[in-house]
């Protein structure tokens, strides 16, 4: 069993994750979606760059290949610029609770991508069944549930934006796996820095200057940058180093719970049966797929042990 400190860190990470969607909702009251993403990425990038430089500023252990720069650019786009913008835009039409539940499908989307693009990844019956179960939950989440006219269009667009952000994160994670050995803090600092150089000019072109967002929205976006983006990345690295990525995956189940509770209590958001059933199926599918991963790792370890007798 993981030490108490690992569980405490995981709980804190999940709370921060839940607060993230609440913060986006508040920041949107004074900023356009792209400026919420741009300020969040830029401030977090500055903080992570300072931390990384103080740690030595080393990124890769081995010489870079010709495609590494392109991969870093793709990771930056798919981990920051595109998903941050999609989530902020989508939350104009959906609740913060829905956005968090939709993002939980990221780990589910990783499974088929890993099977096709990561050498040595197998599918197996349990993983395939988990994917079918989880994606049935995604279908329930997309269902417009009685909305009509402009409300229907906005609801569907917002839901698809959040699910597209999940697909971006999943694709990015596959590309990260194909990188040479890399300093995780340095990778976060670099991808945020690249993201900032891309999204800030785009924000000016699309929305013009950010204007005067007001104290509440400005506080929310600053906390998003420092706590939800920079802080959660640092905490996630510490958890993975201490307890491993499998333990870290439990945040996929906890974060949406906190986000839904915060949205309902603080923002008076309505929690629908559709959202609860969708998340239940996504979580069940994730659990089934991850049980396949644990079984496969155990089989690999057994195969590596010397024969007795």
Image: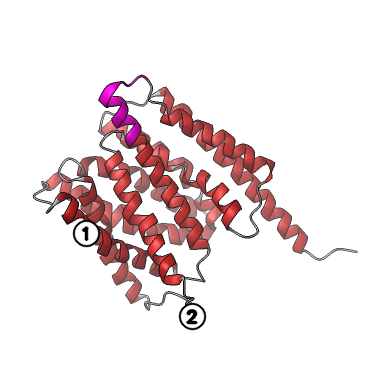
Label 2 crowd bin: few (<14), some (14–19), many (20+), radius 10 Å: few
Magenta range is 146-157
Q: Main secondary structure of the magenta part?
A: helix
Indicate whether 2 appears above or below 258. below
Residue 156 part of the magenta segment: yes
Mark toward the start of the polypeptide (2 vs 1): 2
Q: Which residue is mark 2?
A: 63
On the image, which quarter does residue 186 sit in? bottom left
Residue 119 part of the magenta segment: no
The Cα atoms of the two marked residues, 2 and 1, are separated by 31 Å
Q: Nearer the viewer, residue 9 or 109?
A: 109
Q: Position of residue 298 (x, y in %)?
A: 70, 54
Q: Which mark is residue 200?
A: 1
Report the side of 81 relative to 243 (left or right). Answer: left
SS state under label 2: loop
Q: Residue at x 60, y 52 (%)?
A: 115
SS state under label 1: helix
Q: Nearer the viewer, residue 36 or 139?
A: 139
Q: Residue at x 30, y 70 (%)?
A: 49
Q: Position of residue 101 (x, y in %)?
A: 41, 37
Disc 2 to disc 1: CB gap under 8 Å: no
In the rendered view of the protein, which quadrant contains the C terminus?
Answer: bottom right
Q: Which mark is residue 163?
A: none
Q: Residue at x 38, y 37 (%)?
A: 160
Report the side of 136 relative to 309 (left or right). Answer: left
Report the side of 142 relative to 96 (left or right). Answer: right
Q: Would you say residue 234 is visible in this rendering? A: no
Q: Residue at x 26, y 66 (%)?
A: 46
The furthest residue to the left:
212
Q: Would you say residue 95 is visible in this rendering? A: yes
């Amino acid at each position: 069993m993981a030490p108490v400190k690992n569980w405490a860190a995981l709980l804190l990470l999940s709370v921060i994750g839940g607060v993230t969607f609440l913060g986006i909702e508040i920041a949107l009251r004074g900023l356009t979606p792209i400026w919420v993403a741009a300020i969040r990425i830029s401030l977090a990038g500055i903080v992570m760059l300072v931390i990384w430089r103080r740690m030595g500023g080393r990124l890769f252990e081995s010489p870079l290949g010709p495609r590494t720069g392109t991969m870093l650019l793709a990771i930056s786009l798919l981990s920051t610029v595109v998903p941050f913008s999609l989530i902020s835009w989508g939350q104009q039409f959906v609740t913060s609770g829905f956005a968090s539940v939709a993002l939980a499908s990221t780990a589910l989307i990783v499974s088929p991508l890993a099977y096709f693009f990561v050498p040595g990844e197998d599918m197996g019956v349990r993983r395939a069944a988990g994917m079918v179960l989880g994606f049935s939950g995604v279908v329930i989440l997309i269902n417009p549930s009685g909305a009509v006219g402009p409300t229907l269009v906005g609801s569907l667009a917002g839901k698809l934006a959040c699910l597209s952000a999940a697909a971006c994160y999943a694709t990015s994670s596959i590309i990260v796996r194909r990188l040479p050995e890399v300093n995780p803090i340095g990778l976060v600092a670099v991808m945020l820095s690249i993201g900032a150089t891309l999204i800030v000019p785009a924000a000016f072109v699309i929305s013009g200057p950010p204007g005067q967002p007001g104290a509440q929205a400005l506080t929310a976006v600053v906390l998003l940058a420092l706590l939800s983006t920079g802080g959660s990345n640092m905490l996630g690295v510490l958890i993975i180093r201490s307890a491993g990525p499998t333990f870290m995956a439990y945040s996929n189940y906890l974060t949406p719970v906190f986000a839904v509770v915060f949205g309902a209590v603080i923002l008076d958001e309505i929690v629908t049966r559709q959202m609860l059933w969708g998340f239940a199926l996504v979580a069940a599918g994730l659990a089934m797929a991850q049980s396949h991963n644990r079984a496969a790792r155990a089989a690999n370890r057994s195969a590596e042990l010397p024969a007795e007798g």
